[in-house]
Image (cartoon, rainbow, N blue to C red):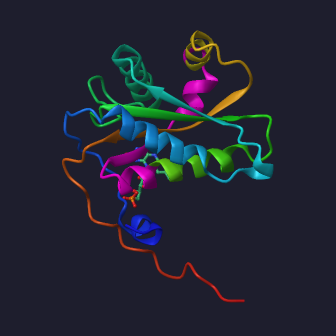
Amino acid sequence: MNAIEAMKTRRSVRKFKPVEVPEHIIDTIIDAGLYAASGRNKQSTLIINVVDKDIQKMIREENRKIGGWEEGFDPFYGAPNMLIVLTDKTHPTAVYDGSLVMGNLMLAAHELGIGSCWIHRAKEEFDSAFGKKLLAALQIDGEWEGVGHCALGYAEEVPPAPKREPNRVFTA
Ligand SMILES: Cc1cc2nc3c(=O)[nH]c(=O)nc-3n(C[C@H](O)[C@H](O)[C@H](O)COP(=O)(O)O)c2cc1C
């Protein structure tokens, strides 16, 4: 699959098989994330690979509460694997850099046959005591803003591409 094909065929997956993605594939996806462009090459983003199922459960629950969903709903749609992208708040291109990392993760996953979905509300999560406690437990110091979670797993169902909205390109 070439890059353009990957960009055009990647979809947000919201139905996953209950099968873990092998570690070496997750590592390859993470590595692709680390190669994203960054403002002034500061590379001031972090990726947390959440492998601990108890921590995953806490994050799903915190995200659900932030999103205001009813109890029992999993905003990660049962995805067995979970990455989180954070960015150094003090850097002027922080959120742009983090978003590019997210893009790389999703495209790399797709190229490797893994479904993904950007799961939001990482900012609220890591602005709160919940996220700060998690970072402290991982001995991550500094001022970090949550950019997004990347839910990963084998797709049970891949939705069709939403239609492209017209009138979005101009020539000057
Ligand atoms: C910044 C951002 C936040 C998103 N947050 C969520 C989310 O919290 N939950 C979700 O199911 N999808 C989320 N998505 C996925 C979008 O809904 C999805 O990209 C959009 O519907 C287009 O579908 P496609 O990715 O298949 O092209 C998010 C995407 C972006 C870029």
Tell me the quarter of the picture where residue 146 sits: top right
| Residue 154 in picture, x, y percent from top left | 25, 44
Quadrant the N terminus occupies: bottom left
Residue 119 visible in the displayed image: no
| Residue 170 in picture, x, y percent from top left | 63, 85
Q: Is residue 19 above or below residue 7?
A: above
Quadrant the C terminus occupies: bottom right
Instruction: Report the residue at 71% width, 38% height from top.
Output: 44
- Judge whether residue 96 is colored magenta: no
Magenta segment boundaries in residue numbering: 106-130
Q: Is residue 152 above or below residue 54?
A: below
Residue placed most toward the observer, 47 or 143: 47
Instruction: Report the residue at 40% width, 70% height from top.
Output: 5
Q: How many numbered discs sit on the rendered protein?
A: 0
Instruction: Report the residue at 52% width, 48% height from top.
Output: 32
Residue 62 visible in the displayed image: yes
Q: Seen in the image, is 58 located left or right of residue 16?
A: right
- Judge whether residue 109 is colored magenta: yes
Tell me the quarter of the picture where residue 77 sits: top left
| Residue 21 in picture, x, y percent from top left | 30, 36
Looking at the image, which residue sits at the far front? 24
| Residue 26 in picture, x, y percent from top left | 40, 37
Tell me the quarter of the picture where residue 73 sits: top left
Q: Seen in the image, is 150 located left or right of residue 42?
A: left
Looking at the image, which residue sits at the far bottom? 172
